[in-house]
């Protein structure tokens, strides 16, 4: 996932010193496996918020794939990865994207939907999905369920971890977090301590936590309908306490 903090670029995704940790902390996972399987019959895929391109590159064999992200530093990594040469990479904002083509599958994963903080921006992204979806195509995206209150795990005590960097060695990392009760927007800071000199690298990020009812209403307004609501990437159906909100659907009739 990459994104914006308000109108300012989120340095977690734009600063090359921080981007180098992205793949180390976000390798594969259940969402990656699900999307690979779900896309098996798609002849064309648009990956919005593609980040460093793990999914887009993995899907590139035998189909047309476009990866879109606003962070040039992430796309530099994407172009160099195996399979990256077969993908069309675009540095662009999903809210305003207008390509002269439609796709069998449009995905927005890695919780990229949450970097859009206002209803207007969220609706703009959903309209972009509809604008680029083929008549019989499918979309899927994910956003964390606010009822699960995952941000409570992002304190320094609960999030402290070691990231094994191939050049730097073991790097200590942690998060800190605060939530605006009025807006529901969560601000979290990601910090890495470089072992050679103790230098700290860090950035603050802001994300929204819209609930399922809000997401569903915006989808309807954008001309999308859900065929299925999942509560996790293992395919479990939606429930009130589910960790994820994952709609899978198509254009509304």
Image (tube, rainbow, N blue to C red):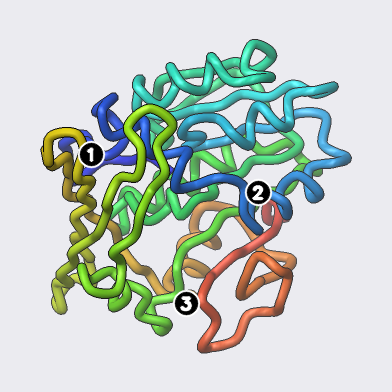
Query: On the picture, is 240 further left or further right than 176?
Result: right
User: Looking at the image, which residue is at 22% across and 65% down?
Assistant: 186
Residue 1 spot, x, y in % from top left: 43, 43
The C terminus lies in which quarter of the figure?
Answer: bottom right
* N-term-proximal mark, 3 vs 1: 1
Residue under numbered circle 1: 10
Query: On the picture, is 83 further left or further right than 154?
Result: right
Instruction: Say above or below: 158 vs 200.
Output: below
Mark 2 in CB contact with mark 3 (< 8 angstroms): no
Residue under numbered circle 3: 213
Residue 86 spot, x, y in % from top left: 69, 14
Give the residue furthest to the bottom. 240
Residue under numbered circle 2: 32
Give the SS element for disc 2: helix
Give the SS element for disc 1: loop
Give the SS element for disc 3: helix
Give the crowd class for mark 3: few <14, some 14-19, many >=20 residues within 10 Å: few
Residue 247 spot, x, y in % from top left: 62, 63
* N-term-proximal mark, 2 vs 1: 1
- Measured in 3D between alpha carbons, the distance from the residue under mark 2 to the one under mark 1, in whole angstroms, is 23 Å
Query: On the picture, is 172 further left or further right than 84?
Result: left
Give the residue furthest to the right. 41
Pick the front one: 220 or 138: 138
User: Looking at the image, which residue is at 63% across and 31% down?
Assistant: 56
Give the residue furthest to the top. 85
- Measured in 3D between alpha carbons, the distance from the residue under mark 3 to the one under mark 1, in whole angstroms, is 28 Å
* N-term-proximal mark, 2 vs 3: 2
Camera-near label (3 vs 1) is: 1
Mark 3 in CB contact with mark 1 (< 8 angstroms): no
User: Looking at the image, which residue is at 32% across and 32% down?
Assistant: 168
Pick the front one: 247 or 179: 179
Q: How many circles with numbers are drawn on the protein?
A: 3
């Amino acid at each position: 996932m990459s994104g914006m903090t308000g109108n300012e670029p989120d340095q977690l995704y734009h600063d090359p010193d921080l981007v180098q940790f992205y793949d180390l902390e976000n390798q594969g996972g259940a969402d990656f496996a699900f999307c690979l399987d779900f896309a098996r019959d798609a002849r064309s895929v648009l990956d919005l918020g593609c980040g460093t391109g793990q999914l887009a590159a993995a899907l590139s064999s035998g189909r047309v794939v476009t990866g879109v992200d606003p962070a040039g530093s992430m796309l530099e990594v994407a172009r160099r990865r195996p399979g990256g040469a077969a993908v069309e990479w675009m540095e662009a904002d999903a809210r305003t994207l207008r390509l002269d083509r439609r796709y069998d599958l449009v995905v927005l994963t890695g919780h990229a939907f949450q970097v859009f903080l206002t209803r207007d921006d969220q609706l703009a992204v959903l309209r972009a999905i509809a604008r680029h979806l083929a008549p019989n195509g499918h979309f899927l995206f994910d956003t964390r369920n606010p009822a699960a209150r995952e941000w409570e795990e992002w304190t320094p005590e609960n999030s402290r971890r070691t990231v094994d960097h191939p050049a730097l060695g073991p790097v200590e990392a942690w998060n800190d977090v605060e939530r605006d009760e009025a807006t529901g927007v969560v601000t979290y800071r990601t910090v890495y301590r470089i072992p050679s000199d103790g230098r700290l690298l860090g950035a603050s990020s802001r994300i929204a936590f819209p609930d399922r009812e809000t997401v569903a209403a915006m989808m309807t307004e954008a001309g999308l309908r859900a065929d299925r609501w999942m509560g996790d990437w293992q395919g479990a159906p939606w429930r009130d306490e589910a960790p994820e909100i994952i709609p899978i659907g198509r254009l509304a009739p």
